[in-house]
């Protein structure tokens, strides 16, 4: 067939599975597999999809067990699966037991069976192959299951079956039935091996023009001639040859990765019940179907091209659909199209152009049906999400670690002051004995504190290892110390309240409502807005449009999108002719923010400059002059912005990034700047005073807690240095199409480490960088 461009393929497959038993889709790399999986989920085929893109034995086993229990499925994988030796379907079935709520399986029988399958008994179940027993509850992690399982018995009857989170050990959700399987290594694969085709039943197999990435990251087409179609019996040979491009990985990393496709696979290709759909550019061949799909036109974030494309296709009687990732983006696109051009507004009103919320990656042109499908991912060149929004994750419950008090430590008693803890002592009061803390005070004073009143005692804490002077019992010293401290706190609080009251009483500048340009900037954001980003953006805009000066603290983890929120606020300020100062603690961060702002405003007439020690004296003088004359809209800089020679023409917004990195003097200078200027503070780790003021309501607080859609979890492992392990990890990452960063702790031996790695992996391309280079 001619290529199924864009989403036409996933739409076709999601419809076809309603009639077919098995559909297999081979894709060029893991990223394509992940994205295709997300697209099928969006189109409603999530219950049918099985993904195999990791070839470690435990992962493969979980998936093939899943396949062997299903009748209808869509299998997504890379061509590497053809080189993966698997046990026969019957062998998997024989070594897999299904446990449900009605199972005739006793408590003792289950434990005996787990031992028979060589599962390891442990205190907690943390990896596949572990099991633990706590009273009437048996936990185990079967090699055939994605999550560990918790079975609760009532005598020999199964009361409940639940999956649980291995990190928090908390139950996630209930299950009607689960599988318990032996490990793949215990099944003799080599003497009785097969391939993925033995798990398929009358399949339709989609092959995408045999493109895959080689080690250099280049696309290689597995057809000798792009216009020639290989008959199905030749496919085995083509794929087998292509797999030689990949380095061999040890058997314990990828199941049977060195084995070659079995001889009976070739026969399987010619079975009458297997249908092959091979996508390639049309050749002069009577057996090919021209489906009439072509690629959607390229827009490249250019609105003029978008408008002319919509007008051109609509004049040729095409129905046009623009698919966007969420409701917010749909609304933005609708506003943009309606406000920019009146003729586009007419097309939307008449239904020729419609905007739909459907998060698919690429659109297409269907010449037969006269349909143009565009997606906002294509319009703005945005990356598509490669994973689904995760369901609620149970976090590990962190116990509060109270400072442990040891013998000899200094402590503070709320009523008696600073003393020294000398241990626990049992004392007799009347007829009763009770255990108490013994505290020593000045001049031999002793206080016994009953363990029921431990809340009155705190460990003495000081930044420096200072020995405090002990309080004297029976004097007013401690009461006076407390009074003085309270007075100082009140003075500091009064000063702060006056500053914030002045800000509240001062009339600031009321920024105007969102313009078309503002909507255009927000719609062109490369990534999908997280719900928190969306909420915080609205809160900041409301603050800026209000009469009083804004003073908002935005807390969010690194990479959660705080800078984008600042970019939108800065743009709103600039559109009303106001200047923006972005204050950052380091020159590197100044350079990074300067590039970000410059890149985001590249389509708009906004002048952005950076001011740090990276600029020469001459450049700095020129920028300062332009800033005072109003020829610079946004200045991004370090402490240099706080210098006496800096004068703004009309400052409207101050953005402070990582406030905790600025000292007291810098903050005093800031106060003089920002009395009636809108202020936005961004931080991942707010200092206690700032956070406290926000929680008390003196400053407004916004939190960005949701990670971006494609954010991957970070795994940390600690291991002894082992070059073979390093080789295994590096090659696994390279096969995924990724890169590797090795950190070494000595400059003088870094070259030796490089040579050592090349000795074991001669095909690696390694570059060296260290601080002593020019």
Image: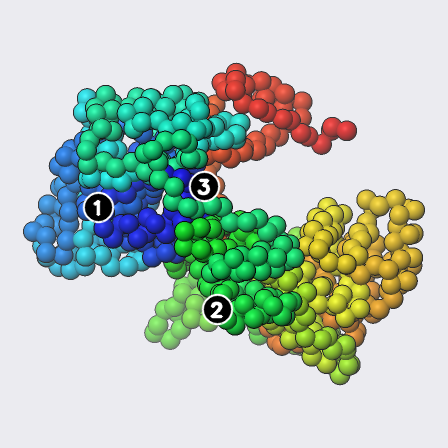
| Residue 505 position (above or below residue 239) | below
Residue 762 in percent (x, y) is at 52, 17
Residue 669 in percent (x, y) is at 82, 64
Q: Tell me the tag on residue 351.
A: 2
Q: Tell me the tag on residue 21.
A: 1
Mark 1 closeness class: few <14, some 14–19, many ≥20 residues within 10 Å? some
Name the quarter where the C terminus is drawn.
top right
Q: Tell me the tag on residue 291.
A: none
Which residue does the image show at 79% across and 75% down from the upper left? 676
Residue 677 seen in the current view: yes
Which residue does the image show at 65% across and 61% down from the upper left? 521
686 or 44: nearer the viewer:
44
Please identify the quarter of the rendering in which residue 469 is found: bottom right
Residue 495 in percent (x, y) is at 76, 76
Name the quarter where the N terminus is drawn.
top left
Mark 2 closeness class: few <14, some 14–19, many ≥20 residues within 10 Å? few
44 or 119: nearer the viewer:
44
Q: Which residue in the protein does label 3 denote?
A: 31
Q: Residue furthest top?
A: 759
Distance, label 3 to label 1, CA atoms, is 26 Å
| Dot in front, 2 or 1 | 2
Mark 1: secondary structure: loop
Mark 2: secondary structure: loop
Mark 3 closeness class: few <14, some 14–19, many ≥20 residues within 10 Å? some
Residue 772 in percent (x, y) is at 73, 29
Return the disc, 2 or 1, that comes first in the chain's sequence. Answer: 1
Q: Residue furthest bottom?
A: 505
Mark 3: secondary structure: helix
Which residue does the image show at 61% across and 59% down from the upper left? 307
């Amino acid at each position: 067939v001619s290529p199924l461009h864009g989403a036409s393929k996933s739409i076709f497959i999601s419809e076809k599975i309603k009639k077919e038993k098995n559909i297999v889709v081979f894709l060029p790399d893991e990223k394509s597999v992940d994205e295709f999986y997300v697209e099928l989920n969006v189109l409603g085929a999530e219950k049918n999809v099985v993904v195999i893109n990791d070839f470690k034995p435990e992962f493969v086993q979980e998936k093939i067990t899943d396949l062997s229990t299903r009748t209808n499925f869509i299998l997504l994988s890379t061509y590497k699966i053809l080189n993966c030796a698997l046990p026969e379907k019957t062998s998997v079935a024989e070594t897999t037991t299904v446990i449900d709520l009605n199972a005739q399986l006793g408590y003792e029988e289950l434990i005996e069976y787990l031992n028979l399958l060589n599962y390891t008994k442990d205190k907690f179940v943390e990896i596949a192959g572990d099991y633990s027993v706590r009273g009437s509850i048996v936990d185990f992690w079967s090699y055939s299951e994605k999550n560990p399982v918790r079975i609760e018995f009532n005598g020999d009857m199964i009361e409940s079956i639940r999956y649980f989170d291995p990190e928090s050990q908390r139950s996630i959700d209930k299950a009607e039935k689960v599988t318990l399987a032996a490990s793949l290594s215990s099944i003799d694969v080599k003497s009785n091996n097969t391939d993925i085709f033995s798990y398929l039943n009358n399949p339709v197999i989609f092959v995408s023009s045999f493109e895959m990435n080689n080690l250099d990251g280049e696309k290689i087409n597995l057809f000798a001639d792009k216009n020639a179609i290989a008959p199905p019996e030749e496919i085995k040979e083509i794929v087998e040859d292509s797999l030689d491009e990949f380095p061999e990985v040890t058997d314990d990393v990828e199941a049977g990765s060195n084995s070659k496709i079995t001889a009976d696979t070739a026969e399987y290709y010619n079975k009458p019940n297997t249908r092959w759909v091979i996508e390639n550019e049309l050749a002069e061949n009577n057996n090919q179907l021209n489906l009439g799909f072509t690629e959607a036109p390229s827009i490249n974030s250019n609105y003029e091209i978008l408008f002319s494309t919509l007008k051109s296709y609509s004049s040729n009687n095409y129905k046009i659909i623009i698919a966007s990732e969420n409701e917010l983006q749909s609304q933005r696109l609708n506003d943009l199209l309606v406000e920019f051009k009146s003729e586009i507004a007419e097309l939307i009103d008449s239904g020729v152009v419609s905007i739909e919320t459907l998060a698919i990656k690429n659109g297409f042109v269907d010449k037969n049906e006269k349909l143009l499908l565009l997606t906002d991912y294509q319009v703005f060149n945005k990356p598509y999400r490669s994973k689904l929004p995760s369901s609620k994750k149970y976090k590990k419950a962190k116990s509060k670690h109270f400072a442990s008090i040891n013998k000899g430590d200094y402590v503070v008693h709320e009523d008696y002051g600073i003393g020294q803890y000398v241990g626990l002592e049992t004392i007799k009061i009347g007829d009763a004995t009770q255990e108490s803390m013994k505290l020593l005070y000045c001049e031999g004073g002793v206080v016994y504190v009953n363990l029921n009143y431990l809340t009155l005692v705190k460990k003495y804490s000081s930044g420096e290892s200072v020995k405090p002077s002990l309080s004297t019992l029976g004097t007013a010293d401690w009461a006076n110390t407390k009074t003085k401290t309270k007075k100082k706190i009140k003075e500091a609080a009064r000063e702060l309240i006056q500053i914030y009251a002045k800000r509240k009483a001062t009339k600031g500048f009321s920024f105007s409502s969102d313009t078309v340009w503002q909507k255009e900037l927000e719609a062109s954001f490369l990534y999908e807005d997280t719900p928190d980003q969306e909420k915080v953006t609205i809160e900041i805009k409301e603050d800026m449009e209000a009469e009083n000066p804004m003073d908002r603290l935005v807390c969010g983890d690194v990479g959660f999108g705080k800078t984008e929120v600042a970019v939108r606020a800065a743009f709103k300020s600039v559109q009303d002719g106001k200047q923006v100062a972005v204050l950052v603690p380091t020159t590197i961060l100044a350079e990074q923010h300067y590039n970000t702002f410059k890149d985001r405003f590249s389509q708009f007439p906004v002048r952005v400059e950076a001011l740090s020690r990276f600029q020469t004296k001459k450049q700095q003088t020129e920028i300062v002059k332009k800033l005072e004359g109003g020829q610079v809209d946004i200045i991004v800089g370090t402490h240099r912005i706080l210098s006496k020679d800096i004068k703004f023409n009309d400052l409207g917004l101050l953005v402070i990034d990582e406030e905790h990195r600025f000292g007291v003097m810098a903050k005093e200078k800031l106060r003089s700047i920002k009395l009636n200027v809108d202020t936005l503070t961004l931080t991942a780790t707010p200092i206690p005073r700032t956070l406290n003021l926000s929680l008390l309501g003196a400053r407004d607080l916004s939190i960005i807690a949701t990670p971006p859609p494609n954010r991957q979890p970070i795994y940390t492992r600690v291991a002894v240095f082992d070059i073979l392990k390093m080789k295994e990890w590096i090659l696994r990452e390279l096969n995924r199409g990724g890169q590797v960063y090795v950190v070494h702790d000595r400059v003088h031996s870094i070259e030796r480490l490089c040579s050592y790695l090349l000795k074991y992996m001669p095909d690696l391309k390694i570059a060296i960088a260290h601080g002593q280079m020019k």
